[in-house]
Image: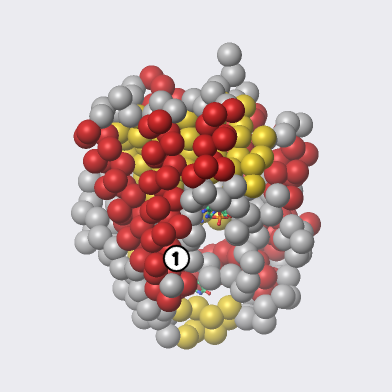
Amino acid sequence: MKKTILLTGGAGYIGSHTCVELLNKDYDVIVVDNLSNSSSESLKRVEEITGEKPVFYKINVLKKEDFRNVFKKHAIHAVIHFAGLKAVGESTEIPLKYYHNNITGTLTLLSLMQEYNVKNIVFSSSATVYGEPATLPITEDFPTSTANPYGSTKLFIEEILKDLYKSDNTWNIALLRYFNPVGAHPSGKIGEDPNDIPNNLMPYISQVAIGKLKELSVFGNDYSTHDGTGVRDYIHVTDLAKGHIAALSKLDTAPGLIIYNLGTGQGYSVLELVNAFAKITGKAIPYKIVNRRLGDIAACYANPQKAAKELNWKTQFGLNEIVRDAWNWQTNNPDGYR
Ligand code: NAD
Ligand code: UD1
């Protein structure tokens, strides 16, 4: 029998790509999303890619009674919990909104899961929980800390899930710490669709390349990295989506509480990304060097060996495919889903 997976936040960037991979693997998919940072058009595109439509509920996970109806109606095997607010800068300005949405939203979800005896969950955590790592690459046993309310919500939710598991080890919980998700589905039909001026590097470069933004500001060239600009582990969103399926399979065969880095293991600097983008797209990427961005660290990349060994999961796409697919998405959808 097909397993039904509930995706909170499934209309968003990573959620929509995960819908595609789940439908391709013959899971039934239910999406609960309030569309606060996404559009239901993404789910129509998922159907264009896969020929199948996820069941969609426009519900805020904070609205418990509305959300309850989804649990009443469907026999859910597992939940992948993407729903959350994710803008770091905004989280420092309106922290209560972030704590309420991300943490109360998770508590609401978990209490419904408990009530309806759905005890398999995959949670979208982030490499941000490692703070500024003392050494590189980062393994899952590194100490954790946070520097902003967004990061704190990720770390607190991890702690909540660990406590839940301690209290009742019939729960099966995967904490997936994403490095920097970028790129788009190779079809060019779904991708990242920022509402406003992008905060993150890759969508910003794409919009400079297409002429929507004038130039990139490179936040600092005086870091202790090989060219002075920040180094990150950019992972293709399709590889990341597949990591969720690997985690679901792991929870089915070897239950418990598991933590994995989802990254490539390879760090690239801002300038390397700019150069790759210019080379692959043939477009000039004008940039200027400006001051460091508050809260940024010099370098961050994963040791992905644990996921490779235990989940049998490895990234397949490199920087060229990342840029190719980001550009394909950007040129096919210059205004995103609008
Ligand atoms: P996204 O904003 O595209 O997707 C999140 C989705 O959750 C959106 O569709 C939004 O409408 C929905 N949502 C938010 N609050 C909700 C609520 N109360 N009820 C129902 N739906 C709600 O972001 P994404 O990039 O796809 O990220 C998915 C998850 O992964 C988030 O939890 C994010 O923090 C985490 N994450 C993202 C990154 C990244 O760089 N994109 C890195 C690490 C972790
Ligand atoms: C950011 C968040 C992080 C979050 C992640 C995924 C901050 C401080 N960190 O990570 O918590 O988990 O997104 O959502 O916001 N850069 C520029 N110019 C730009 C944009 C970025 O030079 O216009 C540089 C940054 O300094 C960094 C690199 O590009 O070195 C990547 O930045 P970004 O894409 O924002 O991701 P992170 O900062 O790694």
Q: Look at the picture and state if 169 lies above or below 233.
A: above
Residue 335 image offset from top left, x and y in percent: 75, 65
Classify the position of the C terminus by image quarter: bottom right
Q: Quadrant of residue 183?
A: bottom right
Q: Is residue 315 visible?
A: no
Indicate the secondary structure of the residue bearing disc 1.
helix
In the visual, does 312 lie left or right of 256? right
Query: What residue appears at the point 73 percent right and 75 percent down from the top-left corner?
Result: 211
Q: Amino acid at mark 1?
A: Lys
Q: Residues within 10 Å of mark 1 (few under 14, many from 20)?
A: some
Q: How many marks?
A: 1
Q: Which residue is mark 1?
A: 97
User: For this rendering, which residue is in front, 55 or 22?
Assistant: 55
Q: Look at the picture and state if 53 lies above or below 108.
A: above
Q: Look at the picture and state if 336 lies above or below 52.
A: below
User: For this rendering, which residue is in front, 66 or 253?
Assistant: 66
Query: What residue appears at the point 33 percent right and 29 percent down from the top-left corner?
Result: 171
In the visual, does 336 lie left or right of 173? right
Query: What residue appears at the point 74 percent right and 44 percent down from the top-left corner?
Result: 45
Q: Quadrant of residue 195?
A: bottom right
Q: Give the residue at the far front of this rendering.
A: 65
Q: Is residue 92 visible?
A: yes
Residue 150 image offset from top left, x and y in percent: 39, 63
Residue 79 image offset from top left, x and y in percent: 48, 35
Query: What residue appears at the point 72 percent right and 34 percent down from the top-left corner?
Result: 53
Residue 331 image offset from top left, x and y in percent: 76, 61
